[in-house]
Amino acid sequence: MNPLLLTGWGIKIKTENLTSRSFLTIFDGRLNERESTIRRFAPRRFPYSSILLDGFSGYISMQAIHWLARNGTPVYVLDLDGRLLSVLLPASPVKADARIGQIHAADDPKKKFQLAKLFVEAKVQRSLQVLDWIEQSHDVSKEVRATRFEANKLKMARTVADLRITEGRIAQAYWRAYSKAVPQCLEFQGRMTTKHNNNASDPVNCSLNYGYGFLEAECRKAINAAGLESSVGFLHDFSDYQTKESLVYDVMEPFRWLVDLSVLRAFQSRILDWPSFYFTANDYRYRFTLEAKKQFIAVLKEQFNRGVPYRGQRMRWDSVIQQKVLELSRFFVGKSPMPDFEEPSPNLERFDSRELRERINSLTSDQAKRLGIGKSTLHYLRKNASHRGQFTIYKPVMTKLSS
């Protein structure tokens, strides 16, 4: 995964047709009076996996659309808060048998429930892993117990409606625990509100919204590549009052943890903080500054590009999403069993546990000297351990601390 973010005023995407070749030329948007960045790319040498547009001024030419489609590059148009407004995708393969199988499965109450349960169970399993990761550095044992208690009720669900109700209760407990891992100054009170309307009223919700838009784009790309119908889902129903990409939202559920973890890491490591956002008084929302947005996308890229062992090879998480959608497509045509969205399982390790923080804070200068830890190293260890944010320790130092 390597998206190109274009934002600001005066974005231009066009082609330069010469005698021997056709270049794609991109003018990045301008902020204030700075000059626009210009990039040129030869065919089949475009290094980005997609283009993210969240600017409101500029154009993309018809020839550029043709060039990008030929090179298999999707273009996603995002709102300032990360909401996916429009998509330009390469041509979808014609797989009528897979779409027919998908529609039949959605029309079969038993299969629909089984698939919906798979999405929910995978989401809950990943959510519990995130909470285990949080619990290593924060006291969230009460909230973790509440989440597990609600998760155990999934086995009693008999309908898709039951699954949605139980999933909602699990989410309430999950976000209570999640909020404890976020610095209190950010005023994050969770995702669930009386109106169920999370309009980025704080920096954390702003980041989560943008990250989920990023994830939605990846899921749409995977569904398009597999030739499935994005509007026919199983956990999320059809809608007669708005356009709803039900299957996209279904596929997102087992992978939302990628965004949740990215947001936590960004704030705990202070990549994001209050100065990273500005407030718009007309709609009472927070939005990213340009530099903060680029830094946050870098965090998302790092998380999505982490490798995980799966079926004898090491896959990035964006590739796992594509693989799971392909497995789903094969299931619809009877060529594969029902996919297991709980696999592969991530290894969420952290090295700044509460026990390690206590070990560092209790270490005297004489003890550190005997372990071979210098005064300056001890100073920075204590400084990092005193903050709630995530930190890392070099392997040689960790070895000395463990002795």
Image: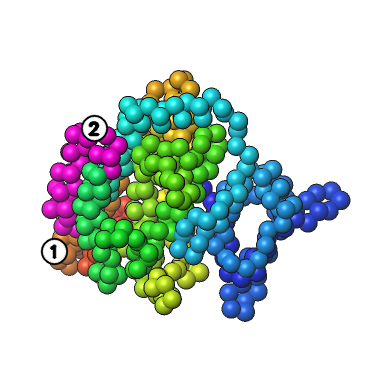
* Amino acid bearing label 2: Arg
Where is residue 298? Give x, y as percent: 47, 58
What numbered label is drawn on residue 158?
A: 2
The residue drawn where x is 38% and y is 36% is 234
Where is residue 227? Give x, y as percent: 55, 34
Left or right placement of residue 245 versus residue 44 in this view: left
Magenta stretch, residue numbers: 136-164
Name the residue beneath numbered marker 1.
362
Question: In the rendered structure, does residue 160 fall within the stretch colored magenta?
Answer: yes
Q: Secondary structure at mark 1?
A: loop
Q: Which residue in the rendered view is the most extreme toward the bottom?
A: 33
Q: Is residue 81 visible?
A: yes
Q: Secondary structure at mark 2?
A: loop
Eye-nearest disc, 1 or 2: 2
* Amino acid bearing label 1: Ser
132 or 373, nearer to the observer: 132
Q: What main secondary structure does the magenta stretch of the protein show?
A: helix
Where is residue 347? Give x, y as percent: 31, 42
The residue drawn where x is 36% and y is 31% is 112
Quadrant of the rendered image containing residue 211: bottom left
The residue drawn where x is 43% and y is 69% is 287
- N-term-proximal mark, 1 vs 2: 2
